[in-house]
Amino acid sequence: MRALRIAGLLGSGVLGCTQRTPRPPDQVEARTGTVELPAPYATDSVRQFSKVLGWPEDKSPLAEGFTVKRFATGLVNPRNLYVTPNGDVLVAEANTEIHGVKKLGAKLIGYADSSRIEPSANRITLLRDADHDGVPETRSVFVSGLNQPFGMLVLGDFFYVANTDALWRYPYRPGDTTLTGQGQKLLDLPAGGYNNHWTRNLLAHPDGTRIYVTVGSGSNVGEHGLAHELRRANVLEIHPDGTGERIYASGLRNPVGIGFAPGTHVLWTTVNERDELGDELVPDYLTHLEDGAFYGWPFSYWGTVLDPRVKEQAPERVKQAQVPDVPLGSHTASLGLAFNEGTLFPERFRNGAFIGQHGSWNRSTLSGYQVVFVPFSNGQPTAPPEPFLTGFIKDEARREVYGRPVGLAFLPDGSLLVADDAGNTVWRVSR
């Protein structure tokens, strides 16, 4: 197997600098090769925040062999994207809420580039490109007055939105440019938490009978006690009316991107792993989810590698911890996930996974700040991630970046949309 050296990006060693325990690296398996994990605290935990400059008119991200153009600008923290069955693009505009904290103090909780914090727009904007020329002619506020919206879904005659604290649904008709019906709250969701794990993503099962909801942890590594983590660090499964909640998969520190591998009913997610163990721990990852499976958090990582900070371990649970499939680099903040089911891109990109890496704050050098591609064949990853959309970093030594990619979605024509929340832009990647 090919050995992979995984670059991680963890947090400032507030919790662990005095607990260094030298030991040989762990050799752990991934579907795409062998991963070498260093010992905890092999390097100090460093807070290295990026400075977002925004995009000059003559600059854009780069994808070799593709055209990258602005699809929409002037948005306020476009965080996630959803394409409706009739081809409309919905943009969730939301931001990390830091109540009662001055901008400088925001850095204490790991918010990269606190100089650009602005109030959350708390709305969903609709973009319609009726003539398919890559420039939307229609732009409207689809729904507003939300609470950090992220996940979006059209299922049957309803539009669903996952706020950070609740799942709502609204009456919906194809072609609606604004929701006019009364919203209904279906389910309360736990809100708040460490590093603002506020995103709640949504995905319907292909048969339409179930909805999956991602909920991140309320802490870095369970430091507030497990009672604080009820219903968190999980992917939940519910019926479309909000009933029948159960935990589909657990032990996932912060699952965000979610999707079914093309041609299968196998669920995959991107997960942000824990901070403050050093530069190269712990790799974020892409993994398939098995019904009822446990993925280690907070007790262990990458299967059964114990986290030395967790005082009350659960050895029986750790024995059952699943090993993730694909490492994505430590502290890359791998968030967005979209599988390519179209034919516009070259053959080697078909059926593979595209992942938006928002970028590091807990590593001595910048990591992430790009979209990577993981090749798939027959529903399985076949190689490590490779850079696809780059150019977000202007000057690594000065920690200057133009923007930060997050949510991804494919248009019906096969082109890829990328939400750049720090750059307030949605990019379109086409051939």
Image (cartoon, helix red, strand yellow):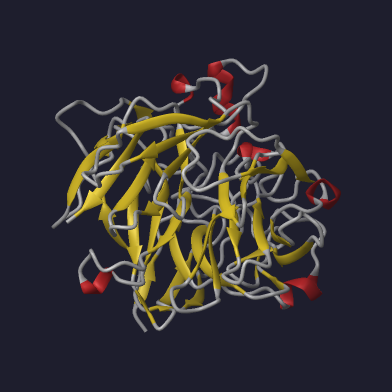
Where does residue 195 sit, x and y in percent of width and height? 61, 38
Q: Which of 29 and 185 is in front in this view?
A: 185
Q: In the image as oriented, which residue stretches furthest toward the right?
A: 227
Q: In which quarter of the image is the C terminus?
A: bottom left
Residue 414 vs 184, above or below: the answer is below
Q: Nearer the viewer, residue 256 or 19?
A: 256
- At a point 74% along the width and 50% down the height, the residue shown is 222
Is 146 placed left or right of 104 in the picture?
A: right
- Report if residue 184 is visible in the image: yes
Q: Quadrant of the N terminus?
A: bottom left
Where does residue 175 sit, x and y in percent of width and height? 46, 44
Q: Which of 16 and 310 is in front in this view?
A: 310
Where does residue 68 sit, x and y in percent of width and height? 20, 45
Is 182 placed left or right of 13 in the picture?
A: right
- At a point 58% along the width and 68% down the height, the residue shown is 302
- At a point 46% along the width and 41% down the height, the residue shown is 90
Which quadrant of the structure image shows residue 355?
Answer: bottom left
Give the number of marks. Answer: 0
Where does residue 108 sit, x and y in percent of width and height? 59, 28
Residue 178 vs 263, above or below: the answer is above
Residue 430 vs 129, above or below: the answer is below
Which quadrant of the structure image shows residue 339?
Answer: bottom left
- Report if residue 188 is visible in the image: no
Q: Nearer the viewer, residue 161 or 252?
A: 161
